[in-house]
Image: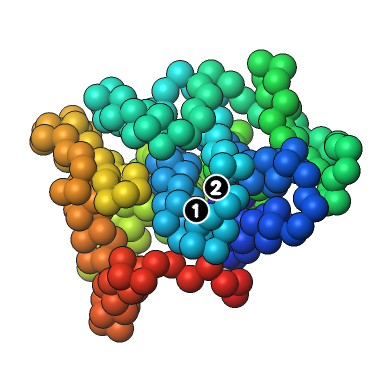
Amino acid sequence: FLKHLYHARNIRNNIVDSFEKAAIPGTSEEERRRLLSFVVVGGGPTSCEFVAELHDFVTSDVQKLFGHLLPYVKVTLVEAGPALLAPFEANLQNYTRKLFKKRDIDVRLGCSVTGVEEYYGDGFRFKAKRALLSDGSLLPFGTLVWSAGLAPVKFTEAIEGVLPRAPNGRIITDEHLRVKGHEGSIWAIGDAAVCDTEPHAQLAQVARQQGLYLADVLSGKQKDDEKPFKFFNLGSMASLGEMKGIYDGSNVGVKGLEVSVPRIKGLVALLMWRFAYWGRQTSIENKFLIPMHWLKSFLFGRDVSRF
């Protein structure tokens, strides 16, 4: 899964571990291809950003140590829907698809992973797994990353029967972010909650704006039922690797009063993406450290050691 920080660290270490196993003398070509087959499930922004970063990490950094293994590397993205980046405008979807095709990233649309099974190959030294796809094909892998939708966190699962929950497990709130049946005493925001009258997407910008709204309520700046929460859509953006990105401003603003701003792609969109996340940092220390890490990676590459 790709959700928490420790997930990212585990995935990174598993990628490095796969290259180290594949580099062991005597490892068969079939096993090398399996170990260096990376499968990402889901076609949303998180999946596409991960695939792009994985491609950059392998071709720019890992290749310095394991350049002879690059011919065995294969990256596959599996999406059940008809297109990548479903929330984005069609031209940006096509732009992303062309970038991935140019990088030899195998994109499989209209296809889903139905299961994972262990199997044994002739001469294999390590335990092997493969994904079962809805079209009947088998996809051996060394690393599989799932980011096609995740179950609720354990806390929301533990309160079943205590607070009202939607079928997907999210806590039901009203338009003031108050939990239904507990107005004025319990609030829920972010991925853990869903409004019964106006559901919002599970996005960071939604959670941030809800947090600011709730802070005003809890600090006494406004009453809990003074005005409903209104989400101001800032648009959607994604980093696509190789100093490229996309920004979709098709529906910027409050629902019903949206405006359309130009769609942007390439280096300018990537700079917007980086500035947006850099600007959301709450500490001065991080605002200094993050650009330094970016510069270090640009000049010397990423660290490929385990941590």
Local crowd size for mark 1, using a 10 Å CA cut-off: few (<14), some (14–19), many (≥20): some
Residue 222: give x, y in percent of width and height. 24, 62
Residue 206: give x, y in percent of width and height. 34, 49
Residue 159: give x, y in percent of width and height. 66, 53
Q: In this view, does 203 lie above or below 18?
A: above
Residue 191 makes an appearance in the image: yes
Q: What residue type is labelled 1?
A: Val
User: What is the quadrant of residue 130 in the picture?
Assistant: top right
Which residue occupies 20% across, 39% down? 265
Q: In this image, 123 relative to 76: left or right? A: right
* Whether label 2 touches label 1, CB < 8 Å: yes
Name the residue carrying label 1: 58
Name the residue carrying label 2: 70
**Disc assigned to residue 186:** none
User: What is the quadrant of residue 306 in the picture?
Assistant: bottom right
Q: In this image, 58 relative to 174: left or right? A: right
